[in-house]
Amino acid sequence: MIRFVFLAFVLAIPPAFAAAHSKSAGTTPADGATVAEVSELSMQFDAPMRIISVTLSAADGDIPIERETGTDPVTVFRATPLQDLAPGSYRLDWRGMAADGHPMQGSFSFTKSK
Amino acid sequence: MSGLAPIDTITVLAIVAKAAGTGAALLAMGSVLFTVIFASYADASVLRLARRIAIGAAVAGLVVLALRFGIRAARISGMGFEGAVDPMMLGFVWQSPLGDAAIWRGLGEVSVLAVLIPGLGRWIAVAGSFAIAGSFAQIGHSLGDPRGALAIALVIHILAAALWIGALAPLHRAVGVARGAGLLHHFGKVALYGVAVLVATGFALAWMLVGTLLALVSTAYGLGLLVKVLIVCGLLGIAALNKLWLVPALGAGRPGAKRALRRSISVEMIAVVLILLATASLTTVTTPPVNL
Ligand SMILES: [Cu+2]
């Protein structure tokens, strides 16, 4: 009897995909892009993500940025560089927690043209 | 390979703590279930050992639970170990699904301590075991869709694994006692159903989480899963060896049977530790391929 109930249960499960992590759905500037102007740094997520730390770095060190978004879970995170960016390549690293509680980290890079 | 996160010291700590926490939870649940299911077959000394393990595992589980909060806070903060005691970071972790799971896990582990109280205490401990099993369904990727099916499959999978793991040490002890052969034989019969449930739910979970055969060999999560399945297959082989050969030999009083069976159960214990580490690594440093 138990075996039958169990078999029925297993067979009744539809094959589906589990999507648990919030994941990155895009950034501004786009990862790997070369842009003429950087007025805003932003990241879009498909589910709320709590961004805890974020660093913008260039070849010769970190550049101060101002967070427009706090540490609340958000689907769009925004920050602005506090100084004009010189031509060159930059990388933004972030760390935080996905909606499911998992620690997450990621980065994206872009180049500012002359 | 896709889906592999960078590994640092805190990540390694997170893996070890997760494996220890899961091991403690499984031992606590399994030992309690063992004392209830095999109460009339097992020797008093064997049941006493199972109760002691349940208590030790529940206490260890509570300690590891607290440590894991600190480790999680350190990981999300990016501040290193300072983040582990940062009230704001700990608050974020508490608000996350880990907080909900910790309530169930903690209540369950405290309830398991009731296994020492005769009579009703046993049933409080059993309820605690189910609460611990339920805590597993509230964290990680079982939160995805289809949530209900994933949660049920996971809880059944965990309880079946717990019964097996919780029985190892008591069975090891039982090899030497008067009614030992009878208990081992009876366990073999129960375990047959347990293994069927374990394998079926394992398949169902893998199917829902991985989805395709290609993802099994092309992603870190899939490969980790294959490693786990390989060790489980080895474990099943040992269990079959015990059931079909060593336990009957013990029952017939054949010389050397005791030693061989004890050694075989010890190997099973080592394999369990390997599985716990593989599973903890799997769920800590990789993500199921659908999330990439
Ligand atoms: Cu996740």
Image: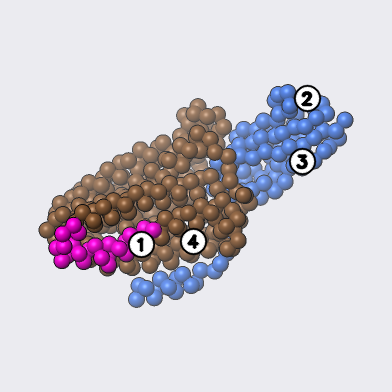
Chain colours: A blue, B brown
Do labels 4 and 1 touch, CB within 8 Å?
no
Residue B133, image quadrant? bottom left
The residue nearer to you, when weighing B218 against B85, is: B218
Q: Residues within 10 Å of mark 2 (few under 14, many from 20)?
A: few
Could you tell me which chain the residue with mark 1 belongs to?
A: B
| Measured Cα–Cα span from mark 2 to mark 1 | 65 Å
Q: Report the residue that reaches farthest toward the right.
A: A114
Q: Residues within 10 Å of mark 4 (few under 14, many from 20)?
A: many
Could you tell me which chain the residue with mark 2 belongs to?
A: A
Which region shows up in magenta? B234-257
Q: Is residue A97 visible?
A: no
Residue at image coords 60%, 61% = B214
Q: Which residue is mark 2?
A: A83
N-terminal of the pair, mark 3 or mark 2, is: 3
* x then y, percent, for residue A76: 69, 43
Q: Which residue is mark 4?
A: B205
Could you tell me which chain the residue with mark 3 belongs to?
A: A
